[in-house]
Image: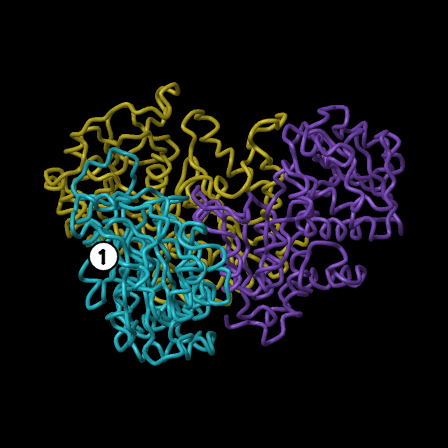
Chain colours: A yellow, B cyan, C purple
Amino acid sequence: MNTFFNVEDLGNLQQALDEAKKVKANRYAYQELGKNKTLLMIFFNNSLRTRLSTQKAATNLGMNVIVLDVNAGAWKLETERDVVMDGDKSEHLLEAIPVMASYCDIIAVRSFAGLVDREFDYAETIVQQFVRYSGRPVLAMETATVHPLQAFADLITIEEYKTKARPKVVLTWAPHCKALPQAVPNSFAQWMNAADVDFVITHPEGYELDPKFVGRARIEHNQKRAFAAADFIYAKNWSCPGVKNAADYGKILSREMSWTVDEEHMSWTDNAFFMHCLPVRRGLIVTDEVIGSPKSIVIPEAANREISAEVVLKKMLESLSSQSYSTL
Amino acid sequence: MNTFFNVEDLGNLQQALDEAKKVKANRYAYQELGKNKTLLMIFFNNSLRTRLSTQKAATNLGMNVIVLDVNAGAWKLETERDVVMDGDKSEHLLEAIPVMASYCDIIAVRSFAGLVDREFDYAETIVQQFVRYSGRPVLAMETATVHPLQAFADLITIEEYKTKARPKVVLTWAPHCKALPQAVPNSFAQWMNAADVDFVITHPEGYELDPKFVGRARIEHNQKRAFAAADFIYAKNWSCPGVKNAADYGKILSREMSWTVDEEHMSWTDNAFFMHCLPVRRGLIVTDEVIGSPKSIVIPEAANREISAEVVLKKMLESLSSQSYSTL
Amino acid sequence: MNTFFNVEDLGNLQQALDEAKKVKANRYAYQELGKNKTLLMIFFNNSLRTRLSTQKAATNLGMNVIVLDVNAGAWKLETERDVVMDGDKSEHLLEAIPVMASYCDIIAVRSFAGLVDREFDYAETIVQQFVRYSGRPVLAMETATVHPLQAFADLITIEEYKTKARPKVVLTWAPHCKALPQAVPNSFAQWMNAADVDFVITHPEGYELDPKFVGRARIEHNQKRAFAAADFIYAKNWSCPGVKNAADYGKILSREMSWTVDEEHMSWTDNAFFMHCLPVRRGLIVTDEVIGSPKSIVIPEAANREISAEVVLKKMLESLSSQSYSTL
């Protein structure tokens, strides 16, 4: 596996879920694979879960890890082409990427959507340069449009908690005080479409996700109807994806607090589990009561981030041939 | 050992000192203990010694270490209960703690006193949440009221340098330009009370430490009388502990430069050693002459921070049963 | 080897180049050397290449690495002598250095020129304190006046790419929007003087490098004449070294864009390779065409930073006697 952005990158999804089970049962069993292999984790944005879980997963596999916070202690990087670099950015990605690649075997990148230029974001302009110029396997730790380590962990969690062969999973928009990217709902939709679940998305008008992620999901604008008979409620805020009106891209179109998931909302479901990728704003996305209830599985969901990352890194390490370390 | 905040947590103190001697003589002898165990070091505040020495100690024991600077590269954490999180804090400790815990085996936390709300600080509101919600052994790297790794290193150092069976140890307040917490003097007092020393505390009126830390120590407001026949002078600034007047908590009540430890002060002692936990403000706490003299043992004192941390981590690792890694 | 600042520190240069070849062919072959040895990397300034390549090199050798960003997460350090420390700096280098040293076996320091006080910078006031007070081998990761890991990597690269026994190497000044230190050109000049190359330096009047680095190099103020028959063009900006007029130290004397290396400049050479230490400002130092051309070897040059660092650390580890870990 040379890139990890989309569910297809994993190959057979059921086999990947079986692998996750195996890894979770014995997370230190594959340390020979990572010996003398270095993971470089590059952060253009903040991180808690992703930073810790990916580092832990790499260490489980015997890898060395180098963490680079681009905005703390490194040079600011120019990402635009054909500019005279007389501003505050000391280095161009065109140099920085192959240089960073030369000191590692696998690159993991976090680079959020700017939410200003839809085309720039949805073309994955930043991370695609890593794919193109690094010559190394590249792993998304949340990009402009996808967060596959999260979605894989979500699916592992649903597999662990489901009590029906084909559970009903509902992705619901919820209000937030800041304009957030669509990476999490995009990937969640993509992965649910690939999984054997009954998948419904609910959100106010104007929050339509990009069709390439929505796929065959059912859209229901009435949140109560969407929640009916649900087995899993997956709450998340996102800003306007700009599908119907590109000019609205990245805007907050609604602050409708009736969408906050509270106990009444959960009473509409079939005693559903509550999920969220975290970090979560209590009082906006979800009430204290719901996130603190026994049906809230946000912590085991987060814990599975270690497992999804370990499966992905393990597959990348297996793909690295012994002669892969190019002596540049 | 499941927590390390107070001297009692160590169990038998003499045995712990013997263990420190053993560890210092052979600090790499216990690497099997830490294999595939991860220490998560969480910093809400700056650190030099604690960061380096604790990381070194964990590595000595064969552990993996993940360092998280909460204010650099991670999300800001909400620590209050029952709030609508519409400010700058993206995540609540109630989620962050169990999530962070799920990626590690032992948690070390640094979280200083805010010096605003005495009750909040002295209840150890932040770190007690780590104890309560992490399900992991929790280790203080200086909390609102204690700094036990420092006090343990101080005692190890006194044991190494003492020339009498029961030396006289004096904790003296000294002036400073900033309002500092009481964690270091609190712990030092607690540990000296538990050790076999003649222990005296001297400070200006109004700087009385909390009785639970002062214990059976002698208080002497006349610094010169306190220094008489001393074998060890331990200098430290602290702000008003608010014992006599809670409204003064965290305030600077005195900038009296006559309390700065200089050569004249040291002449009152029995050729005492000079100690300080560092960092130290030269010219305020102590003069260049005293801290630079052959009787200054601040460097070996700091070097013993590696040893105190290694003993504590070793004890925690020994307590972790083989099945302790809960698969959340 | 106890310090690494100048080319002489390496001993026989040809042997060091042979060692580099050996290390590059098998970079994981020396892990017993670094077992239970800790490298402390101290950054007073930003870093990308140096941070990653030095960390990678140490890990290749089996070392543990602790990274300390002095301006992020640690205390600000006082570097002046005989001051009352009542400002924003909490700790003096005189304490910080031996303390940091007590937790590691080798220290690597990055501390750039301030470009304000020539005497302070050229006396290497900061790093010389590390040499004097740490009791540990000290390695420059760019100091006020030298960047030997870069110059060693540059020489390794020239050795790999040269097609003549004695190639012509030209160090050329180029314009920049910020005042930069002279560390890179100083070290490059020093190393080229020690190597078997025909070495020419070209720059506008006023940019004369310090004679102790220029040595026997030929100076040519006409850039075109300098480039004639060159095999390697090494571009770099530097601010006024203050050799002719100390009052100009650190100033930008020229923004002459005719010095930017473009295709016409390269046409004056004997089909020369283009080198730069990176980060490079495109459009100022060099055009997109030249740095993106097949003759640009900036990426393999940067990749060799891992090799130069590994050779240096390997030599330092070999020098550490088994009893070297002083139990302070």
**Residue B199: x percent and y percent?**
28, 69
User: In which image quadrant can residue A306 be found?
Assistant: bottom left
User: Mark 1 belongs to which amino acid?
Assistant: Leu
Q: What percent of the width, then of the height, locates residue C243?
A: 77, 36
Q: Quadrant of residue B321?
A: bottom left
What residue would you read off at disc 1?
B209
Q: Residues within 10 Å of mark 1 (few under 14, many from 20)?
A: many
- Residue C221 at x, y percent in the picture: 85, 31
Q: Nearer the viewer, residue A45 or B208?
A: B208
Front residue (pair A149, B139): B139
Determine whether, in the image, residue A188 is placed left or right of residue A101.
left
Q: Is residue C123 above or below residue B215?
A: above
- Where disc 1 sits, the SS reads loop
In the image, residue C319 sits, relative to residue C57, either above or below, namely below
Residue A198 as seen in the image, left or right of residue C86: left
Depth check, front residue: C9 or C188: C9
| Quadrant housing residue C313 | bottom right
Q: Is residue C21 above or below residue A92?
A: below
Disc 1: host chain: B
Residue A311 seen in the current view: no
Any part of residue A89 in sight: yes
Q: How many marks?
A: 1
Relative horizontal placement of residue A265, taking residue B26 as reference (left or right): left
B124, B301: nearer the viewer: B301
Residue located at (46% from left, 54% from top)? B287
Q: Position of residue B19 (x, y in %)?
A: 37, 78
